[in-house]
Amino acid sequence: MPAGAVIAGMRAALEAGSVSPDVVAIEARKHLAASRAAADTPARGPRPSRAAVVNLPAPRSAAAPPDARPAPSMAAYDQLLATPPAAGRRGAR
């Protein structure tokens, strides 16, 4: 993508109040498409975007409540093994 289109995309994104790279890419593509279409017509600047930028709220950083569940245990899965591990060799290979 030409640098001029990217710069135009950055300007349009900033005018819309966004610093999102996705918005910059969309606006740069719109500028590039407009400039290619303008090659067939007399020169004029890119049209301003009427699109609204919606900023999502930041995720809440509140602490999670304490977890009262017991710690997970693998004891129930030992019965699925063909031969259970020897008492002294647990975890060794």
Image (cartoon, rainbow, N blue to C red):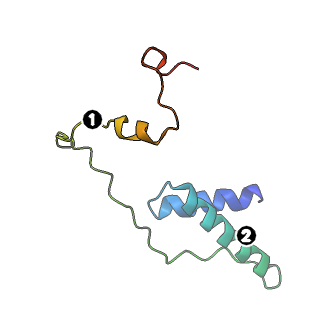
**Numbered circle sitting on residue 5:** none
Say which residue label 1 marks: 71
54 relative position to 51: left or right: left
Q: Residue at x 61, y 67 (%)?
A: 26
Of residue 54 and residue 86, the one placed in the foreground of this image is 86
Q: Residue at x 49, y 78 (%)?
A: 50
Say which residue label 2 marks: 32
Q: Residue at x 20, y 41 (%)?
A: 69
Which image quarter: residue 88?
A: top left
Of residue 47 and residue 63, the one placed in the foreground of this image is 63
Which image quarter: residue 23?
A: bottom right
Tell me the amino acid under the disc marked 1. Answer: Ala
Residue 8: x, y in percent? 64, 61
Residue 27: x, y in percent? 61, 67
Tell me the amino acid under the disc marked 2. Answer: Leu
List the single residue furthest toward the top. Answer: 88
Q: Secondary structure at mark 2?
A: helix
Figure quadrant of the C terminus: top right
Residue 13: x, y in percent? 53, 61
